[in-house]
Image (spheres, grey):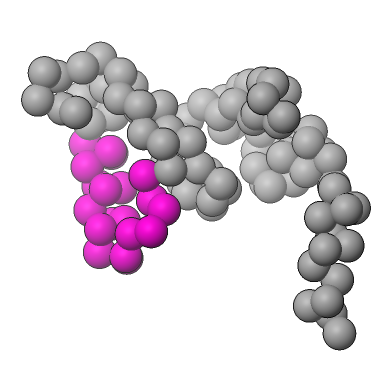
Amino acid sequence: ALIHRPEILFLDEPFEGVDAIASRTLKDLLSRLTARGLTVFLTSHVLEIVEKLCTDVGIIAKGQMVHQGTMEELRRDGSLEDKFLAVVGDDSQERQKLSWLEA
């Protein structure tokens, strides 16, 4: 994906299913690439990774972009998780499915 030196690199859930060593290696690589001016577009459900690596964030819900902004803008209102839940909503049906965990 990097041989032809693209201006933008698209990665879909690059940290899914990798161990801690591979994760650190990938984070270091992405940091070096972005420092050289490469744009990295990645998708992730792991909001902590997004907060650490990304400068700009878009939140997609049900196939629609529902929020877009810089990480700095998002942090004014709390964490990325707080913003995500505020924009997407707290799905009570999903909470109900997991209620067995409290038993």
Asked if the stretch drawn in magenta spans residue 29, the answer is yes
Q: What is the residue that sits farthest to the left in this orientation?
A: 3
Q: Which quadrant holds residue 76? A: top right
Image spot of residue 18 (x, y percent): 33, 59
Residue 83 forms part of the magenta stretch? no
Q: Which residue is pictured at 54% across the width and 51% down the height?
A: 46
Q: Residue at x 26, y 48 (%)?
A: 26
Report the quarter where the N terminus lies. Answer: top left
Question: Looking at the magenta stretch, what is its main secondary structure?
Answer: helix
> What percent of the width, then of the height, locates residue 51?
53, 44
Viewer can see residue 78: no
Q: Is residue 78 above or below residue 21?
A: above
For image coordinates 9% across by 25% down, the residue present is: 3
Name the residue furthest front. 97
Q: Quadrant of residue 33?
A: top left
The quarter of the rendered structure image containing the C terminus is bottom right
Q: Looking at this view, is 18 or 27 the one in front? A: 18
Query: Residue extending furthest top?
Result: 7
Give the magenta-colored segment's residue range: 14-32
Residue 72 appears in which quarter of the rendering?
top right
